[in-house]
Amino acid sequence: MPTPTELETDVDGSQGQEVDSKYRLIILAAKRSKQLQRGATPRIDIDAQKHKPTRIALEEVMRGRVGFDIKEDGHSPAE
């Protein structure tokens, strides 16, 4: 299990789409973990019997295997 410092390094040096904050990393991993718990296949080569869905999801996000879109706020600024 990586230390918090290693997580920061992995997030900054991710190969896929860059996760811009720790908050977004946790939200992405939580959503992916729910998918894994509901039967989705892991996107990385890891023994699902030895690792919990949360750990697998976090690893997938850190490796850039989970895509995401950042949506802009739909509200226009007050004039």
Image (tube, grey):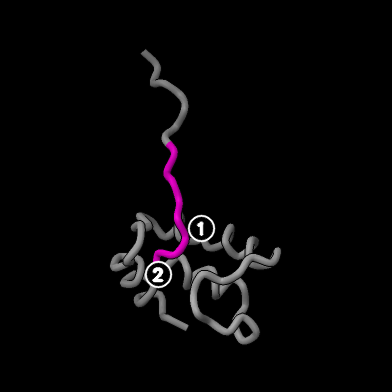
**Left or right side of 7 for 46:** right
Considering the numbered disc 1 on the image, is that residue within a helix, a strand or a loop? helix
Judging by the rendered image, the residue that carries numbered circle 1 is 28
Task: Name which residue lies at 35% across and 57% down.
Answer: 17
Label 2 amino acid? Arg
Label 1 amino acid? Leu
Considering the numbered disc 2 on the image, is that residue within a helix, a strand or a loop? loop
Determine which quarter of the picture holds residue 79.
top left
The spot of residue 33 in percent (x, y) is 60, 65
The spot of residue 66 in percent (x, y) is 47, 60
The spot of residue 71 in percent (x, y) is 44, 38
N-terminal of the pair, mark 2 or mark 1, is: 1
**Mark 1 nearby-residue class (10 Å; few <14, some 14–19, many ≥20):** some
Asked if the residues shown at circle 2 and circle 1 are in contact, with their CB atoms under 8 angstroms apart, the answer is: no
Q: Residue 55, relative to residue 70: is it above or below? A: below
Specify the farthest residue to the left.
13
Judging by the rendered image, the residue that carries numbered circle 2 is 63
Q: How far separated are the C-alphas under marks 2 and 1?
A: 12 Å
Determine which quarter of the picture holds residue 65.
bottom left
- Between residue 68 and residue 6, name the one nearer to us: 68
**Left or right side of 38 for 19:** left
Give the numbered dot on residue 70. none
The spot of residue 64 in percent (x, y) is 40, 64
Residue range of the region highlighted in magenta in the rendering:
64-71
